[in-house]
């Protein structure tokens, strides 16, 4: 099948390469010439495990091309929309300008029977408006709009594309639904469940999933705060919750909360659209989810401040992580970066290390960037693990003791082996974990031996000099 893919970001580039892998002839269209040049040369513009191989396979087969030129769409008669739908400036709503612009660009190229298939995450009702636009411009029945949302996770984009757990096909006609299903024949033959529905339900299927996921994280983080206040342990608590088959063990990790290019903006766009539709209770619930999420960032900054005796000014903080999650270089709405930035704004000397996202920080004047864990933490009064990279969990705390000023770590992703770190003399703090007085304290560490488990002790220490 000859297919065009509009937008070649995390979603579109992965989708285009996956389609070519299945044998389709695919052209990826993007307005960003730099991105297109890289992709055409089989050089991934972002970090995504397995993507380089998939891209190279497609480009070298000749089935996968990229262009900024609309004429490259050629005689493709199925067009996927994978452009960005970020949050609109000054509003919670989604910014759909890229969607409209891609459709306007496509209009003169749509022959009779053309099918435009949305894959971007959009507010419910978008497909209906796009269909109206096509009908007005081309005449009713000439071209059809359908929605086929994508559920891939960054860091797992390739495996999620090659082996999704469901396909949602939202089309107004059986013909359109059949043509979309034909694109995914290898998946359907392999038994991936397909839900055929109308475009509105398909649009909602995607945004609703992200609303549920975001809400689940905020619920867990509320439970973590209660655990902390009550002296209970959130990790044992989520273990118990996960054993209930109605809840399940996945997506229950407490900590710094959700970020990225999807959950935060999709949550807000959903609330905004629901309000437009007159459903005000959605915003009541989802604003609370959003507030709880932001609260995790404030709590983490506050914890750092407390551990440094009430002020972070001129204190050295080694931050491990800038990406919004492990195995990604994406820093969109990254909780890690939000915390690092807030601490720098409060006067701390913040040095950040991230295995893949550091290139995004080159222009930042408020943050120093280190190319390794040791250099990020050299002389640190406080170490903070803000992204769940396995490399951070694998750090040898005894070895790190030699480079830091004080052995105090904030484990904002609850990813460290607490006993091991405590055995090496570290004071380990995490949102949701009971505040244990560290047995080894910081005695014998590179600092002056003041037990940092008690913020008042730090305060005394810092005031003393
Ligand atoms: N990132 C994910 O994991 C993921 C997963 C599922 C769904 N989504 C959804 O997919 C959409 C894209 O997300 P993303 O993360 O890939 O965004 P992105 O910012 O990485 O990529 C968007 C791309 O669209 C291009 N673009 C903008 N206007 C265009 C136009 N008129 N014509 C052609 N290209 C244009 C941009 O230059 C950019 O390369 C969003 O709606 C998002 O919510 C993303
Ligand atoms: O138990 C958890 C799980 C995740 N997170 C955080 O939540 C955010 C989002 O994580 P994840 O969902 O794994 O990554 P995304 O790539 O943003 O994927 C989400 O957003 C995509 C874009 O819409 C959807 O396609 C996916 O299905 C949906 O999981 C990250 O900051 C994670 O650190 C937690 O705090 N606790």
Image: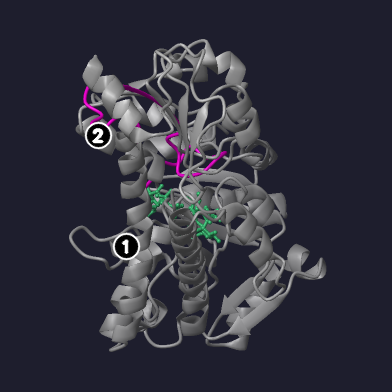
From the image, give the main secondary structure of the stretch colored magenta. Answer: loop
Foreground pick, 447 / 95: 447
Q: Which residues are magenta?
A: 307-334
The earlier-in-sequence mark between 1 and 2 is: 1
At a point 48% along the width and 21% down the height, the residue shown is: 442
Q: The N terminus appears in which quarter of the rendering?
A: bottom right
In this orientation, does residue 269 appear? no
Provide residue 20's location: percent of width, then percent of height: 66, 51
Is residue 351 placed above or below 37 in the rendered structure?
Answer: above
Q: Quadrant for ligand 1?
A: bottom left
Callout 2 crowding tier (Cα within 10 Å): few <14, some 14–19, many ≥20: some
- In three-dimensional space, the C-alpha distance between marks 1 and 2, rounded to whole angstroms, equals 24 Å
The disc placed on residue 42 is none
Residue 309 forms part of the magenta stretch = yes
- Comparing labels 1 and 2, the label whose residue is closer to the camera: 2
The disc placed on residue 310 is 2
Tell me the SS state at disc 1.
Answer: helix
Which residue matches tag 1? Answer: 291
Colouring method of the image = one colour
Quadrant hosting residue 366 = top left
Provide residue 135's location: percent of width, then percent of height: 36, 83
Is residue 250 placed above or below 443 in the rendered structure?
Answer: below
Tell me the SS state at disc 2.
Answer: loop
Provide residue 45's location: percent of width, then percent of height: 48, 36
């Amino acid at each position: 099948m000859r297919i065009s893919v509009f937008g070649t970001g995390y979603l579109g580039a992965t989708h285009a390469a996956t389609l070519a892998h299945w044998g389709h002839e695919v052209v990826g269209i993007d307005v960003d010439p730099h991105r297109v040049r890289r992709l055409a040369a089989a050089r991934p513009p972002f970090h995504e495990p397995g993507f380089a191989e998939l891209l190279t396979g497609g480009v070298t087969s000749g089935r996968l091309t990229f262009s900024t030129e609309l004429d490259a769409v050629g005689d493709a008669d199925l067009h996927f929309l994978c452009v960005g739908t970020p949050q609109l400036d000054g509003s919670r709503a989604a910014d759909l300008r890229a969607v409209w612009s891609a459709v306007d660009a496509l209009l003169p190229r749509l022959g009779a029977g053309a099918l435009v298939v949305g894959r971007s995450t959009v507010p419910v009702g978008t497909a209906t408006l796009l269909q109206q636009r096509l009908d007005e411009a081309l005449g009713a029945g000439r071209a059809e709009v359908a929605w086929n949302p994508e559920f891939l996770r960054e860091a797992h984009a390739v495996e999620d594309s090659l082996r999704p757990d469901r396909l949602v096909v939202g089309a107004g006609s059986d013909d359109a639904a059949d043509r979309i299903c034909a694109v995914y024949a290898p998946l359907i033959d392999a038994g991936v469940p397909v839900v055929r529905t109308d475009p509105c339900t398909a649009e909602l299927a995607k945004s609703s999933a992200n609303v549920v996921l975001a809400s689940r994280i905020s619920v867990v983080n509320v439970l973590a705060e209660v655990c902390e206040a009550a002296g209970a342990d959130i990790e044992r608590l989520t273990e118990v919750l996960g054993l209930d088959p109605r809840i399940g063990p996945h997506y229950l990790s407490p900590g710094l909360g959700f970020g990225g290019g999807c959950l935060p903006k999709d949550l807000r766009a959903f609330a905004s659209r629901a309000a437009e539709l007159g459903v005000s209770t959605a915003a009541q619930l989802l604003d609370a989810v959003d507030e709880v999420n932001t609260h995790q960032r404030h709590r983490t900054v506050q914890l750092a401040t407390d551990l440094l005796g009430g002020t972070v000014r001129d204190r050295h903080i080694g931050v491990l992580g800038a990406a919004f999650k492990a195995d990604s270089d994406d820093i969109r709405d990254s909780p890690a970066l939000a915390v690092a930035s807030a601490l720098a704004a409060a006067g701390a000397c913040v040095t950040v290390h991230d295995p893949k996202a550091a290139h995004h920080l080159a222009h930042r004047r408020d943050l120093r960037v280190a190319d390794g864990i040791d250099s990020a933490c050299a002389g640190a009064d406080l170490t903070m693990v803000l992204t769940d990279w396995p490399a951070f969990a694998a750090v040898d705390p005894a070895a790190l003791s030699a480079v830091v000023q004080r052995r105090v770590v904030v484990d904002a992703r609850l990813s460290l082996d607490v006993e091991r770190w405590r055995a090496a003399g570290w004071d380990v703090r995490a949102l949701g974990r009971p505040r244990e007085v560290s047995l080894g304290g910081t005695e014998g560490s590179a600092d002056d031996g003041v037990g940092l488990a008690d913020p008042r002790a730090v305060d005394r220490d810092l005031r003393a000099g």
